[in-house]
Every structure is written in C-alpha cells, then in structure tokens.
C-alpha cells in the first residue's frame, strides 16, 4: 500500500465580516482535511479511461469493481488495503454473453449485478455467469406505459427489499422527452410519470446538426438509491425529487443555497445548425452551475453533493477540438442532514480542476478518484467541522 500526502489543509469557518475579507475566503464555510492515497496495482495496469464511472461499490464499501473495457473484466480493488486483488472476466458472447456494449451497471446485492445493454439486460454473478437474461423493453409489452421504439431506459436503481422493481428514466431523444419509469418485472408492469424536474432538465438537451455532423449535449439526469431513498435529480438544478416506493408518487426537496447558485438560468435553443452557436451554448452552459450526483455517508449520517462552475479560455475553440475544453473549475460542496435538509455549503478551493471523476463516501470521508500519473489514487476529504 502506498500513501502519499497530497494536502493537509484546515479551512477555517469564516464569519460574516471577519477573518479573510476576500471573496474566496468568504465562500469557505466548513473545516476539512484533504489527503491522497494510492492503490497498489501489483502487476496490473488498471483501467482509468472512464474515470471509474463504469465501476461499482460493494454493499459494505470495501471493494470497488472497476470495469476494464480492454480486458472485458472487472478489476476488484480492496479499498481497505488499497490494493488490486483480482481480475473478474466476463463474456461478450455465448451462453453467458452480456453483449459488447452496455449502458448501465447496477449492484443488486453482493453476489449479483445488472449489466444493461442496448438490446439485452442481464443479471450476472461475479464469476461471470449469467443468471437471468431479459429485456426491459418487453416489461409490460402492449401497455401504454411500456418502453416504445426509439426510447431508451437508463439510470436503473432498486431498493434492497424490492429486487424485482427497477426505477429509472425513459428517454426519447427524437421527441426530447424524459419521464420517470418504474418497471416491475415480477408483475410484468410498466409505469411512467411526468415529473417537473425532468422537464426542467430537458431544456438543456441541445441537438446540433449542420447536415454533415450530428451531435448533442445532454443534461445529466439520474435516479439513485441513496441513504434509504429513491432520488431523482440532474446537473441543472439543486432540486431533488423523492419517489415513495409504496405509492410510486413523488415529492420535491427544494433548496435556496446562499453561496452556490440554485440552478442554471440560461435559455438556449434546443436545435442548432451553426457550429459557433453550438460551441457558445456549450461554453455558457458549462460556466453556469452544474450539480453532480448525491452520495450518502452512513458514518456521519449526511448526504454530500458537489457542484461546479467551469472556467474556459478566452478565444476560439482549438482546431483539433470539437468543443471548447475547460481549463479550470470552481468546486462547491453542499452538505445535507439525513432528512435532506441543507445544513452547510462551501467553496473547496483546492479542487480547482473540472470534477468529472467518480466520488463516494466511505469510512466517514468523501473519496474522489484521482488519476495520478496514470495510476489509481483517491483524494480523501474529511469534514472536521460544519
């Protein structure tokens, strides 16, 4: 195990009108420590290209299963020992084949995971055996709420005591629609619901087509099981929606942050044919607040959520880049109690690069993946005072 000190910083709680009068000092509202730890890869070259977004945490958060697309296998990482343990191979084809590409990964329990593809969905054990083969598209087939041609179902999530009920988002890029979807495999039933937050997020789905090149900017939308709740959110707003697992009704958690913008406010065209305009929209949207996903800290019984304002260079996009690339970021952290009440928010000045990497809470700390000279590391953030 290697353990390198990245930073050890105590950020003082600033009172209004006291201490550091700079704008940055006034925005640092919590005390915390930062450190970086490294994973011993042994003889393996770990797959870091996806920034760990194709990875899963075990229920006890000891093991990280990181999908290595080159090997088509999961790297099992012991986070307690900070060491690579073994490679768990899977099959693309054959009796246990899960297909070459997939859209979603979901841990169902410590023994099984869901690998959800474009035309097939599979439940597998960690030894690479397929235990169930089905299709979300066929759930409730013929019913008005079932998934239709041209739609995709993504961001699936489950409650531990409802293993046959999947919550997710059904999307039609062509129709620019996003709805909350509940798929009950046991009763072969599909339920779709219009939720206001998805309409708000859909306003930031931008399609570009100049007759030769087609592309799109999709706002991030997620459904997650977190802290015993099924939550729906996205990058354009601080707002969160919670789904009642007994009635499938939803209700909102609304926030009025003091130092972090509440939501994006820009109004953009949804269909664009001019490349310069598309670049401008991408840049302006990135310079507005973007909220990341929510994580649950079971030790301190808190939720954490990062957000960021991207910083871009002035001037035109470089010739070898399709879109302008950010050169920095202002990163904020919001802290919520177990009832999802916002209790603290702060600028985190040390996190000054675009925060695209996966993060999670473990052992009372926030772990943020960090690529350190092509090796797997984690910035550990421990909040010492709110």
Image: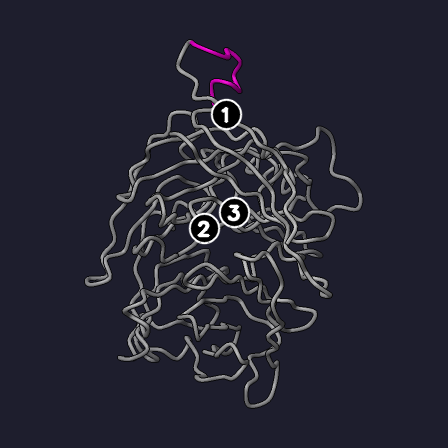
**Pointers 3 and 2 in contact (C-beta within 8 Å):** yes
SS assignment at label 1: loop
**Which residue is at a point 61% across and 37% down the rendered structure image?**
283
Q: Nearer the viewer, residue 92 or 62?
A: 62
Q: Nearer the viewer, residue 66 or 196?
A: 66
Local crowd size for mark 3, using a 10 Å CA cut-off: few (<14), some (14–19), many (≥20): many
Position of residue 231 measured from the top left corner of the image (x, y, whole percent) = 34, 53
Q: Which residues are magenta?
A: 18-27
Residue at which label 2 appears = 362
Residue at the farthest left position: 247
Marks 1/2 in contact by CB < 8 Å: the verdict is no
From the image, tell me which residue sits under label 3. 367
| Residue that numbered label 1 is attached to | 11
Q: Earlier in the sequence, mark 3 or mark 1?
A: 1
Q: CA distance from mark 1 to mark 2?
A: 21 Å
Q: Residue furthest right?
A: 319
Determine whether the residue tagged by mark 3 lies in a helix, strand or loop: strand
Residue 226 drawn at (x, y percent)? 36, 54
For the C terminus, the image quarter is top left
Q: Which residue appears farthest toward the bottom when viewing the image?
A: 95
The correct choice, above or below, for 203 with respect to 14 in the image is below
């Amino acid at each position: 195990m290697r353990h390198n000190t990245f930073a050890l910083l105590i950020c003082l709680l600033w009172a209004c009108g006291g201490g550091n009068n700079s704008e940055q000092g006034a925005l640092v509202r919590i005390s915390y420590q930062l450190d970086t730890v490294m994973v011993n890869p042994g003889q393996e070259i770990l797959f870091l290209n996806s920034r760990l977004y194709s990875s899963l945490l075990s229920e006890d958060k000891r093991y990280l299963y990181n999908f290595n697309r080159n090997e088509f296998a999961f790297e099992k990482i012991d986070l307690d020992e900070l060491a690579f343990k073994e490679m768990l191979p899977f099959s693309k084809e054959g009796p246990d084949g899960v297909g070459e590409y997939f859209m979603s990964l979901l841990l169902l329990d410590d023994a099984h995971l869901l690998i959800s593809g474009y035309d097939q969905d599979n439940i597998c054990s960690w030894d690479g055996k397929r235990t169930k083969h089905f299709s979300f598209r066929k759930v409730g087939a013929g019913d008005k709420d079932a998934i239709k041609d041209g739609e995709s179902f993504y961001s699936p999530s489950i409650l531990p005591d409802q293993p046959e009920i999947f919550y997710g988002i059904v999307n039609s890029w062509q129709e620019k629609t996003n709805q909350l979807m509940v798929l009950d495999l046991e009763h072969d039933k599909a339920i779709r619901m219009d939720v206001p937050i998805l309409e708000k997020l859909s306003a930031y789905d931008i399609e570009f087509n100049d007759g030769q090149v087609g592309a799109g900017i999709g706002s991030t939308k997620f459904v997650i099981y977190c802290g015993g709740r099924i939550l729906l959110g996205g990058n354009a707003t601080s707002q969160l929606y919670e789904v009642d697992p007994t009635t499938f009704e939803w209700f909102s958690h609304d926030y009025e942050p003091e130092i972090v913008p509440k939501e994006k406010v820009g109004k953009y065209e949804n269909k664009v044919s001019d490349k310069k305009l598309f670049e401008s929209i991408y840049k302006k949207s990135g310079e507005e607040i973007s909220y990341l996903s929510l994580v649950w800290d079971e030790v301190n019984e808190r939720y954490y959520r990062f957000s960021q304002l991207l910083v871009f260079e002035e001037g035109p996009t470089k010739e070898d880049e399709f879109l302008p690339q950010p050169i920095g970021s202002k990163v904020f952290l919001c802290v919520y109690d177990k009832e999802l009440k916002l209790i603290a928010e702060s600028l985190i000045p040390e996190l000054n690069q675009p925060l695209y990497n996966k993060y999670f809470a473990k052992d009372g700390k926030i772990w943020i993946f960090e690529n350190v000279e092509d090796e797997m590391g984690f910035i550990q953030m421990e909040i010492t005072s709110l």
